[in-house]
Amino acid sequence: MQGKYHVITLCGSTRFKKAFEEANKRLTLEGFIVISVGLYGHSGDREVWEQMDEGTLTRTKEMLDDMHKRKIDMADAIFVINVGGYIGASTASEIAYAVRTGKQVFYLETPADRICPVCGKYYFRERNAYEICPVCGWEDDPVQRREEDLAGGANHESLRDARKNWNDALS
């Protein structure tokens, strides 16, 4: 927080440049200090990338990824630009980093069936794809989502028990 204003960092694929710009404008008008990307690798700034050799390009992308994590460090929360539910590997790593460092995570689009059913702090990239939540370790098992008392699917404990254990650990 800076003065009376919360700070929020925008995360997501730069292919959604228009959504970044719209979110930046809306959140600013709602009273947030907004930190955004510096370059749009997938939907602009082509002249920057075209001039780089492969080695320089790789180092630059690594630098930009690291800089974005530092932008997350400066923020109270992140706002994920996930148009159509899309979250790529880089954005997923930013979400996991934000959660690990205690930041709130908000989404442009949040289908309930993609939120981790145990901790509620991670957004799975695909529905029912057996992805593992980096926050609580729950493997997204569609059978265990339907049958909350079933133990021994992708996870050793049932969904109901995993939720209880997670909540007990937090108290």
Image (spheres, rainbow, N blue to C red):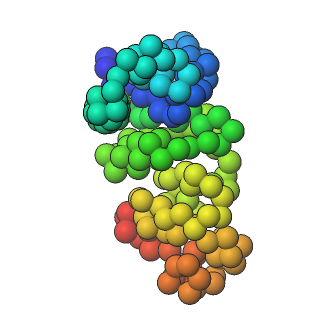
Question: Could you say which quadrant of the image residue 15 lies in?
Answer: top right
Residue that lies at the very extreme toward the front in this rendered image: 53
Number of marks: 0
Quarter of the rendering occupied by the C terminus: bottom left
Horizontal side of residue 1 vs 27, given as left or right = left
Question: Could you say which quadrant of the image residue 145 lies in?
Answer: bottom right
83 shown above or below 151: above
Q: Residue at x 59, y 27 (%)?
A: 16
45 shown above or below 156: above
Residue that lies at the very extreme toward the right in this rendered image: 146
Estimate the x, y position of residue 140 in percent, counting from the top left: 58, 67
106 or 89, which lies in front? 89
Is residue 5 at all visible to an observer of this figure?
no
Estimate the x, y position of residue 102 in percent, counting from the top left: 34, 46
Horizontal side of residue 72 vs 120, given as left or right = left
6 or 88, which lies in front? 88
57 or 127, which lies in front? 57
27 shown above or below 158: above
Q: Residue at x 43, y 64 (%)?
A: 136
Q: Residue at x 65, y 43 (%)?
A: 85
Quarter of the rendering occupied by the N terminus: top left
58 or 127, which lies in front? 58
Estimate the x, y position of residue 144 in percent, counting from the top left: 64, 76
Estimate the x, y position of residue 14 in percent, counting from the top left: 52, 28
Is residue 35 at all visible to an observer of this figure?
yes
Q: Residue at x 63, y 82 (%)?
A: 149
